[in-house]
Amino acid sequence: MTPTSFTDLVKQNRSCRRFDATHVIEMDTLKGLIELARYTASGANMQPLKYILVNHPEKNDAVYQSLGWAAYLKDWKGPGNDEKPTAYIVITGDSTLAKNYWCDHGIAAQTILLSARDQGLAGCMFAAINHKKLRSDLSIDEHLDILLVLALGKPVETAQIDDVGPDGSIKYWRDEQQVHHVPKRGLDELIHATW
């Protein structure tokens, strides 16, 4: 489904964990996502983020094995071979340029994911990363701090936003049709005060 407005784009940009493993994401597409991310805000305009782009099957598998998949889904260990991501972006912070990356990587990651969604792709942002394994498998220099990994691909899962129920649980879940349900707190609960 192609978004028709910015509101649609944001609502459709759910964390996706199941992809069409036959859909190749070209390196030029990944570079285009970074081209857009480079225009995002940066604390003190230090611009310390560096990106590692991965779309080679062997390296994709190495990144996949370094990630923690969907902690709330206890009986699901991650996508099967036919539903794995076909590209990754590793977001790092260059410690020779800055010692604090503030929220730069969050801003960049969300921009990348929104742009991917606008192009018919989807992704998932990971902070549950085996840093040592990933650093070794991708030969990441020590001066680059691993901050986030974005898994990308053509989505094959349906996600639905639900209101948080009476039990207050915010845990995402899947129904019998494998629709991924994401509970969200209501607006009244989020707004602490108005003046």
Image: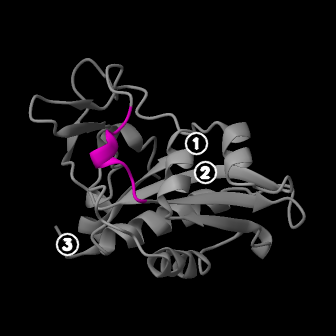
Q: How many numbered marks appear?
A: 3
Q: Secondary structure at mark 1?
A: loop
Q: The residue under label 2 is which amino acid type?
A: Leu
Q: Is residue 76 above or below residue 55?
A: above
Return the mark for residue 127: 1
Return the mark for residue 148: 2
Residue on which disc 3 sits: 2
Q: Secondary structure at mark 3?
A: loop
Count residues near mark 3 (Cα–Cα under 10 Å), then give few for <14, some for 14-19, many for 20+: few
Mark-to-mark CA distance, 1 and 2: 5 Å
Q: The residue under label 3 is which amino acid type?
A: Thr
Considering the whole magenta stretch, tell me its main secondary structure. Answer: loop
- Image point (72%, 56%), residue name: 102
Q: Mark 1 and 2 residues: CB-CB less than 8 Å, in contact?
A: yes
At which x and y percent is residue 40? Answer: 59, 75
Q: Which residues are magenta?
A: 78-86
Q: Is residue 46 left or right of residue 87?
A: right
